Image (cartoon, rainbow, N blue to C red):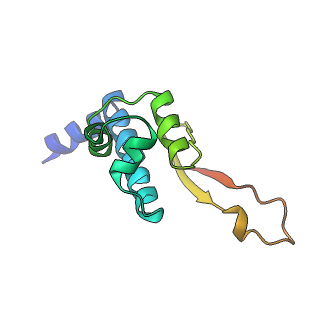
Amino acid sequence: MSDANDWLEEMRKSHEYVADNAKLDFAVAIERQLEQQHLARKELASRIDASSAYVTKVLRGDTNLTIESMAKISHALDCKLSIHITRSSSQVRWYEVHQGTQKAADPQIEVARIWARHAA
């Protein structure tokens, strides 16, 4: 069993693994926005001047996205694209505060904050 664990641990260190996870995280975020905005995949495809098949490939994580294509999709969904790197020993949590929900008494709250906590 340790051979499988060792193999998985080595895979997690590879840039291919990191890239695949980033693509899947992006796909999940797109799906969430489509659901929240009550948009069909076909509408997103139209907004980015692409085929429905391309959108399906993006949502499956089957395409190599450029930052430009990610920005185009984000813009079409009226969203902000955020890219963040941190040390591999860190844990990252994203915390979103929507402008409409901020309290007037606390104007220092940013629209989005990145909290990174270094693992002990």
Q: In this view, does 6 lie above or below 100?
A: above
Q: What residue is rendered at 44% in x and 37% in y?
A: 48
The location of residue 52, given as percent across then percent down, is: 29, 42
Kindly identify the residue that appears in the image at 27 percent across and 39 percent down.
57
Q: Position of residue 23 (x, y in %)?
A: 37, 39
Q: With 90 as the anchor, is 96 left or right in this view?
A: right
Picture layout, residue 95 above or below residue 119: below
Residue 33 appears in the figure:
yes
Rendering coords of residue 109 (x, y %): 77, 60
The answer to whether residue 20 is above or below residue 35 is: above
Quarter of the figure with residue 50: top left
Q: Where is residue 54 in the image (x, y as percent from the top left)?
A: 30, 36
- The foreground one among 120 and 68 is 68
Of the pair 26 and 92, the residue shown nearer to us: 26
Residue 45 left/right relative to 7 = right
Compared across the picture, whether 6 is left or right of 18 comes to: left
Q: Can residue 120 be seen in this view?
A: no
Q: Which of 21 and 6 is in front in this view?
A: 21
Q: Quadrant of residue 98?
A: bottom right
Nearer-the-camera pick, 53 or 86: 53
